Image (cartoon, rainbow, N blue to C red):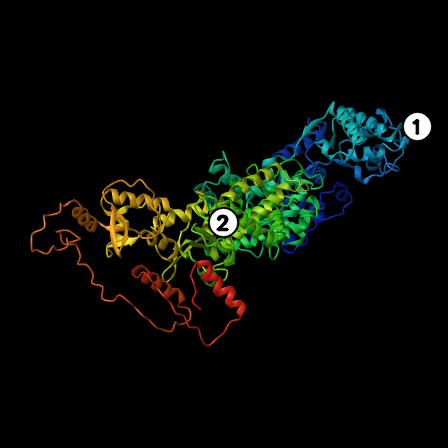
Amino acid sequence: MNSFHTIAVPHKDILEKRFTLDTFAADLWDVFHQRGVDEYKDSIIFFEKTYLTEGLRNLLDIVERRVKGKGGDPVIQLQTPFGGGKTHALIAMYHKAPQWDVKPVVIVGTSLNPNKETLWGMLEQQLTGRISQLSGQVSPGKEAIRDLLNRHQPTMILMDEILQYTTRAAGIKVEDTTLAAQTIAFMQELTELSATLEKVALIITLPSSITEHYDESAELLYKKLQKVSGRVEKIYTPVQDFEISKIVRRRLFSHMDETQAQKVVNEFTTYAQKEGILPENTQPSEYRQRFMDSYPFLPEVIDVLYHRWGSYPEFQRTRGVLRLLALVIFSSMKSQIPYISLADFDLNHQELRQELLKHIGQEFNSIIDMDISGTTANAKKVDQLLGDAYRGLHLGSRTAAGIFIYSFSGGREQGVNLLDIKRIATTTQNPAAIISETLTQMENKLFYLQNIGAKYFFSIQANLNRILMNQKANVKEEQIQEFERELLQKNSCSGYFKVYIWETDPQKIPDTQDFKLLILETSSPSVMEDIRNKKGQTPRVYRNTIIFLNPVENERMAFHDTIRQQIAYRAIEKDPHLSLTKEQADTVKSQLKKISTNLNDGILRSYRVIMLPDREGFKRIDLGVPTYGISPLLDDEVYKRLRIENEILENINPIALKEKFLSKNEYVLTEQLYYSSLKTPGETRFRSRDALEKAVKEGVRKGMFGLGEMENNRPRYRYFKEEIESPISFEGNECIIRDFICIAQKQAEQRPEPEPQPGVIKQPEPVYGPEPPPEPEPVLTKDRLRLKFELPKGKVSNMMGVCNYLQSKFQRLKIELIAEDGGITDREYEDKILEAFNQSGIDLEE
C-alpha cells in the first residue's frame, strides 16, 4: 500500500509547517476587520477548505430566503458544544452577504469593552457609521430599534459570544440596575422586533452546556438569554457528529486520490473482518464507509479526539482536533504508513506532546518518557520481547501510544477495551492476536498502565508493577535467607528424618541411629565428606544414616526472586500509606495466593538433589521437576524417592534378606545384619529395627532361614518354621542360618539313637543330614592372618570395610598401627586418640 500522504495530499501550510493554533481559530471579529489568516478572511479560500455540512447548507438557505423577503426564520440560535462550528457558520454567512446583497452587522462579545461599548451602539454604528440615536447605557427601547432596522433592510445581524459580554456587563452599574440587565432587555426587544421586519435576520450563538459557563451568576444570565431569545428563535446545529470527519478531511487535505484511498480502506476492512476486530454491532460495509469518510485517519482517531478530548473545555473541539491532526500529519510524513491510527501518534514530537499535556497536566510528561516513547521506555522493551517476526513493527510502542490517547477525557469516560486496542494498534502485516501477547508483556513491564474493569488506561498513579519494583529493591538478602530458612523448616516436618537446615559443622550433627536429612545451602563435597566421616574430631560410627539434600543453583536464583516478590507484596499489603484501589488490593491478594503456590513449587525445584553415602563416595539421585500445583513436604518427597530406589526398606521381604545375606553365607550375625545398615555407607537402610525384626520372624516362620546362635564357632538353630514370641536381640552370637543347615540339625534331633554293636566304633552323625547341601561347604585354608602395609592418605575409610569383614570371620582382630613422619602434641594425643578409644570401649595397649 502507498504512503498516506501520496494519496491524501496535505494542504501547503501543513507541508511547510506554517500552521499555528490561530490557523484553525475562527474569529468573526478578525474577519470583519480583514485581519487574521487567509483561510478565514478570504472568502474563496474559506469555501475551498470548508466542507458544507447538511446543517450549514440548510442554515445558509434559510438566512438567504429571510434577507430576500422570501420567508425563513427571523431569529436563529446556533447551539453546538464549544468548538463545534458556531463561529465557522457565522463566518460563512458573513462571506455570503455580498452575494445576497445584504448589510451584515457583526457583534462579538469577547471583542467589546462593556465600559465603552454597548450592543445597541455597535448596531447603530455599523448600520449608519456613527452612534447618535442609540447612545448611553440604557436600552433604547423598541421604537428606536425598529426605526433603525426598518431604514436599513435587508440586514443580517451576526452575534457571537454574547454570554461573555453579558457576564462582564453584570459588574457595571446603570442607575438602579446593571448593564447586564439592560443588555438582556435589549436582546428581548431585538428578537421580538426582528420577527416583525420582513428582511431582518438575527443569528445568535450560545454555548450548549453549562460546563462552559463561568459561575453561578453566569449560569443565571445564560438562562435569561435563552429565555428572552427562545420566544421567537429557532435552534439550528450546523454540524452533526457524522459530518466531523469530512470537515476535518476537507480542512487538512488539498487533494484526495479516491481510488487509492478506497483500495487502502478495502484492504484494512477485509483484514479487520477476518481478524474479528471490527467494532461490536458494526457491519463491514458501515465501517468501510466511515473509514472512507475519515481517510487517511481511522474513524477512531476522529471519534476519540472529538468526543473525548473535545470534552475538555479548553480543547475547542473542531479547532483542537484540526490542530492536533495537523501535527500528527506533519510528524508522520517520513513514515510509509498507508493510514493513520491513534497508535501512530508520535509522543516524542514535542509540539504534539505539549498540545496534549496542556489539557491533562505536565505530570504525564515523565510517564510518557518512562513507559511509552522515551529512549529506554518500557514499551520499547516489549517491542524486543515479541520475537524477530514482529520486532520491527514496534507493536509495544504502538499499543502504548494508542492506549494513552484513549486514556483521557473531560468527562468520566476513560480507557479502551481489548477489541479496540487490537484495531488501532495492529498492522495488516501481523495477526491481530499478537496484540494480546503484547498487552500481557506490557502489564508486566509498564509502570503506569492500569487494567481495571476490562479497560486499559494510563494514570499518574503507579500500577502494581512500579510499586512492586520499588518494594523489591528494598528487600535485603538477609530477609530472603531468613524467609527461605523458615520455608524449608515449614516444608520439612513429616517426621521421617531429623532435619538439619544449612548446618555445616560435623560436631552439631549427632552420631545416632536416626536417619538425618541435611539440607545444605550450597553443594559442597568437602562439607559432605567431613560430616559423613566425623562427628567433631571423632570418627562417625553411623555413617549410613546421613542423607544430604543439595540445591540446584540455576533453579534457586528464580526461587529467590519469587521469595523477593512475596516479601514485597506482603509489604505492599501492610503499608497503610499506599492508597491502593480496590482492584489493586484484590490483585495483591490474588498474587500472594499465586506466589504461595509458586514458593512451594520453587522449593521442590530448588532443593532436589539427594546425595547418599555409598562405598565409592556419594550416590546422586535427582528428584526431578515437580508437578506444578502439587505441594508435598520436601522431606516426604525425599523419603518416598528413597523407598522407590530401595535405599530405604520399609516393609522388608524375608526373601530379600535371604538373597542378600545368605546366598553366599551359611549364617549372618543379626548384629551385623542390623548395624551394617547403619554404619556401612551404601548398605540398604531399614526404616526401623522393628521392620527388620518383623522380616526375620516372618522368614523363620516360613522356613526361609532359621534363627539361632553361634556355638563353638558353628551356627546352631533355635527357631525354624515356627513362631518366635521373644524379641530378637540383634546382639552377641545371635544369627540367621541357612535353611538346609536348620533342616539337617532338626532331622538329627529327631532320629533315635541306634543300639551300639560290640566291637564297632561309633561314627559321629553327620551334621547336615543325608541331603547334600546346595553348595559345597567352603574349606577354611587360613585360620590366622597377619597383614602389614603402608596406608596411603585418604584411604582410611576403605580399610574400615576390610576390618569389618575380617571381624565377621574371626573372633579376634588385633591391629598394630604405626604413624611416622609427622607429629602431634600430648594434648592432641589425649583428646583425639585416647578419647576415641575410650568412647568406643576399646582397650588400648600402648
Disc 1 packing (10 Å; few <14; some 14–19; many ≥20): few
* Left or right: 398 in relation to 660: right
**Residue nearest the viewer, comparing 312 with 567:** 567
The location of residue 806, given as percent across then percent down, is 32, 63
Q: In the rendered structure, which disc, 1 or 2, sits on the residue that comes first in sequence?
A: 1
Q: How many marks?
A: 2
Q: Amino acid at mark 2?
A: Thr
Residue 247 visible within the image: no
Query: In the figure, residue 846 lies in which quadrant?
Result: bottom left
Question: Which of labels 1 and 2 is toward the front?
Answer: 2
> Label 1, on which residue?
175
**Residue nearest the viewer, comparing 832 with 653:** 832
Q: Amino acid at mark 1?
A: Glu
Disc 2 packing (10 Å; few <14; some 14–19; many ≥20): some
For label 2, the SS is: loop
Where 153 sits versus 392, above or below? above
Query: In the figure, residue 61 lies in which quadrant?
Result: top right
The location of residue 147, given as percent across then percent down, is 84, 27
> Label 2, on which residue?
427
The location of residue 729, given as percent across then percent down, is 35, 47
Where 279 sits versus 435, above or below? above
Residue 150 visible within the image: yes
**Residue nearest the viewer, comparing 291 with 422:** 422
**Residue nearest the viewer, comparing 258 with 696:** 696
Q: Residue furthest right?
A: 175
